[in-house]
Image (spheres, grey):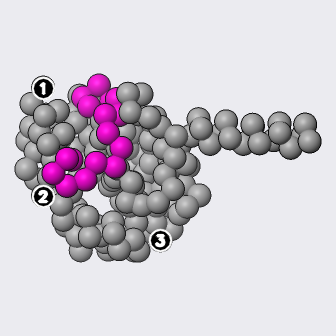
């Protein structure tokens, strides 16, 4: 019984630590872009950043892409950036979706699917999953959508 309890506590503490929370600094993500060059999330410090975990095969992700593109185009000149993390296993499918959806913001690929280390680090259990960061790199919202997302971006870029 003691062993089962110890294992439960160990596993639950692992999952608890894997969940990011509003107010904490965003964990670093370092992944390859379409050319194979490593891009660091921290390279965007000083900008308001939306981390967007997605995949080409995820219908809800693809349906949300037009709104993300619209927000990016509206606020990029004011210091807003999107750091899109695809968990696609197939690079060709990822790049085709990027082209089809006209995604011109930062794109990286963690090609391990549901075993993607970056998604696990953020506690992503379903996609799309988004994390809004302020200019200091702190998480200010988890999964903000629609008008709430735009309102938060507008407020943060004007600070």
Residue name at image x 42 percent, y 51 percent: 32
Q: Is residue 46 magenta?
A: no
In the displayed structure, 10 sits above or below 34; it is above
Q: Residues within 10 Å of mark 2 (few under 14, many from 20)?
A: few
Asked if residue 26 lies left or right of residue 154, the reply is right
Q: Residues within 10 Å of mark 1 (few under 14, many from 20)?
A: few
The residue that label 3 is drawn on is: 90
Helix or strand or loop: what does disc 3 sit on? loop
Q: Nearer the viewer, residue 63 or 151?
A: 151
Residue 159 disc label: 1
> Could you say where residue 81 lies in the image, as x and y percent from the top left?
22, 44
Q: CA distance from mark 3 to mark 2?
A: 26 Å
Q: CA distance from mark 2 to mark 1?
A: 21 Å
Helix or strand or loop: what does disc 1 sit on? loop
Is residue 62 visible in the rendered image? The answer is: yes
Q: Nearer the viewer, residue 111 or 123?
A: 123
Residue name at image x 59 percent, y 58 percent: 115
> Could you say where residue 35 lies in the image, as x and y percent from the top left?
36, 57
Sequence-wise, the earlier of marks 1 and 3 is 3
The residue that label 2 is drawn on is: 70
**Magenta segment:** 134-149
Is residue 104 visible in the rendered image? The answer is: no
């Amino acid at each position: 019984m003691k062993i089962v309890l110890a294992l439960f506590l160990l596993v639950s503490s692992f999952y608890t630590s894997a969940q990011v929370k509003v107010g904490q600094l965003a964990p670093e993500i370092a992944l390859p872009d379409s050319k194979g060059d490593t891009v660091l999330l921290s390279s965007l410090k000083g900008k308001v950043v939306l981390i967007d975990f997605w995949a080409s095969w995820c219908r809800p992700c693809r349906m949300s892409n037009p709104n993300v593109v619209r927000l990016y185009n509206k606020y990029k000149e004011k210091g807003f950036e999107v750091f899109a993390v695809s968990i696609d296993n197939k690079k060709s499918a990822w790049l085709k979706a990027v082209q089809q959806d006209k995604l011109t913001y930062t794109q990286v690929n963690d090609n391990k699917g549901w075993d993607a280390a970056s998604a696990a680090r953020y506690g992503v259990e379903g996609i799309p999953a988004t994390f809004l960061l302020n200019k200091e790199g702190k998480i200010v919202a988890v999964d903000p959508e629609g008008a709430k997302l735009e309102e938060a971006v507008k407020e943060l870029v004007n600070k």
